[in-house]
Amino acid sequence: MKMDINKRIIEEIEKIKPFLQSDGGNIEFVKFEDGNVYVKLTGACSGCSLIDVTLKEGIEEILVNEIPEVKQVIKVD
């Protein structure tokens, strides 16, 4: 069951990646634990002043809407 959720999360992240990559950034799935998705943001995303907006209003909103088990997205370094 857990692998299925990981697979679904990765599939959604793959859909988001081209948008971040078009601005010079990228996103990597780290893990899913207790309703939290942990991601690493790299490239232009790591130093962007709008990353918190992108994370909460973009990435998190998509994942929470598409995958009911996801409660929030957390950025890790």
Image: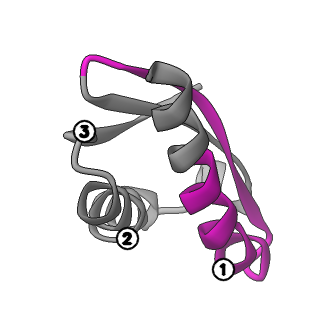
Instruction: Tell me the kind of residue under disc 1.
Output: Phe
* Total marks in image: 3
Mark 1 and mark 2: Cα distance apart in space = 11 Å
Residue 69: image quadrant is top left
Q: How is the image coloured?
A: one colour
Instruction: Tell me the kind of residue under disc 3.
Output: Glu
Q: For residue 69, which numbered disc appears in the image?
A: 3
Mark 1 and mark 3: Cα distance apart in space = 24 Å
Residue under the image location 60 percent in, 40 percent down: 7
Answer yes or no: do the residues labelled 1 and 2 have beta carbons within 8 Å?
yes
In this rendering, the label closer to the viewer, 2 or 3: 3
Horizontal and vertical percent position of residue 47? 62, 52
Instruction: Tell me the kind of residue under disc 2.
Output: Gly
Residue 62: image quadrant is bottom left
Horizontal and vertical percent position of residue 64? 26, 55
Q: Secondary structure at mark 1?
A: helix
Residue 66: image quadrant is bottom left
Residue lying farthest front? 1
- Does residue 31 appear to the left or right of 21 in the view shown? left
Answer yes or no: do the residues labelled 2 and 3 have beta carbons within 8 Å?
no
Above or below, 20 relative to 67: below
Q: For residue 58, which numbered disc appears in the image?
A: 2
Q: Say which label, 1 or 3, has the lower sequence index.
A: 1
Residue range corresponding to the magenta coloring: 10-34
Q: Which residue is mark 1?
A: 19
Horizontal and vertical percent position of residue 5? 46, 35
Q: Secondary structure at mark 2?
A: helix
Q: Secondary structure at mark 3?
A: loop
